[in-house]
Amino acid sequence: MKKDLPLKQGSAKKQVLVAYGQRFALLFVLPLIVPVVWMLQTLSRYGVNVPYSDEWLIVPIFQRMEHGITLATFHDLWHAQNFHRLFFTQSIITIAANITDWNIHAEMYISFIFCLITASIVYLFVRRTIKSNLFALLAMLLAGFWLFSPVQSENWLWGWDVAWFICTAAAVVSIYLITRATGKYRYVFLTGAIAAGVVSIFSFGWGQAIWPVGLLLLLGQKQTKKPIIIWSISALVAYAAYYFHYAHSGPPVPVLAFLHEPINAICYLFVMFGRPYTYDLYAAMTLGAVSLLLLLPVSLLLWQRRKQLTPYLPWLGLIFFALIGAVMILLGRLVPDPHINTPLTDALQPRYTAMPIIYIVGMSGLLLTMVDRLKLSKNLVMYLVLTILIVQVPLVWSSYYAGQVKSKERYELMVKLQRCSHLPAYAIEKDCLSSNNYLSTQDTAKQQIEYLRSKHWASY
């Protein structure tokens, strides 16, 4: 009997590993196959190797690095651009550029990798909060299709917008680590969460949202004073570093600018949160309003469960991050003149779908976690799953259709700019330069093109 015991223990371990592998395949690999393949096909088909707009701002950094100007290069990487400090984003782009001769496709695939990281963390959320394999599978299906939706066409097909994906992935990692910051390794997880928060805030401006979100999560966990104080001090240090010698390059925007046109501001948010479903203005406004008003009944249900919030915290973290980030986008896009309304069509820009998509993933996971904790009959469970699919499938299809339309439009624009900017410097038309590199003067734009041409970078 004693001789057989190690075999039984080994067999038990093997069964556990097999069960874990089967659950991983069911809840991670299977749900992501279609959206991942779809996005890889989209990047391959519509990605164009040409720098565009803000991306040209990094060319001077390449030039300084070539001359070994380390301090100046660090200052450029750290320097604020519009509302953002893009230190980690520009560092990653610079490293990738030196490895790939600044092939913009590489930046697009880096975005894909960071999106995959986000999906992986969402999978960990699902494993920890949803026990039913059926509901867990549904949660990952929805997360996979929304996270990899081509509706973010501008973010996917513009290498510079890798910033969105780095910022989001770091924020989601931070949320996960905060929710794990309990027990013996509390401070290890908290340290990791702080480090991820630093990466998020210094990759893109909306990463500032992770610090109030982290504080809310720690309070929701009913943490002791010490972790809350550590997080709060870390947040103050991060904000101080962010705004030290901060020079905003755009027009000043009053923090309370939305009070001049509150209805317009609310409608802007509605359009933004409806944009993942469609690019029609009024349809987006309607769907966005429904999506945000869903917070009211959900808040009521959470209040009833306020003594047992732990399983809901990861999803609430995603929702709070998306909402705070969206409000920051709104404040950044408002026209400071009280006599001028920010056009609602501005909220239809594909890049702004990043925050609403995180909101959709968070809300879907939250609702399924709530349902998972109800004792429902099998028939009722099937009816519920069928209802969710009836609602979500048309919305996902609409999202992918809208994304493909905008991806094709962007591809056509980028191909046009690539062709005209590859002409000899004397033959490049002013319209081409102003469309492709409108942030620089005509002479500077031509000099930057010639620099890239001398290095054979970005297909020049």
Image (cartoon, helix red, strand yellow):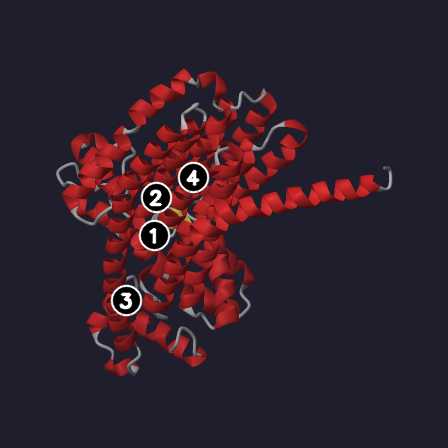
> Amino acid under label 4?
Gln
The alpha-carbon separation of the residues under discs 4 and 2 comes to 18 Å
Q: Which residue is identified by label 3?
A: 411
Picture quarter containing residue 412?
Answer: bottom left
Determine which residue is flagged by label 4: 208
Q: The residue tagged with tag 2: helix, strand or loop? A: helix
Q: Observer-nearest residue: 243 or 231?
A: 231
Task: Identify which residue is drawn at 75% across, 44% down.
Answer: 10
What distance separates the C-alpha of mark 4 from that of mark 1?
25 Å
Q: Quadrant of residue 15?
A: top right
Secondary element at image label 3: helix
Crowding at mark 1 (Cα within 10 Å: few <14, some 14-19, many 20+): many
Q: Which amino acid is tagged 2?
A: Ile
Q: Earlier in the sequence, mark 3 or mark 1?
A: 1
Q: Position of residue 413 (x, y in %)?
A: 24, 67
Place of residue 218 in the rendered image (x, y in percent of width and height, measured from the top left) = 52, 26
Which residue has dot 1 on it?
149
Of 374 and 152, the residue lying toward us: 374
N-terminal of the pair, mark 4 or mark 3, is 4
Between 305 and 87, which is closer to the camera in this rendering?
305
Q: Are marks 2 and 3 in contact (CB under 8 Å)?
A: no
Return the disc, 1 or 2, that comes first in the chain's sequence: 1
* Spatial CA span between label 2 and label 3: 23 Å
Residue 261 seen: yes
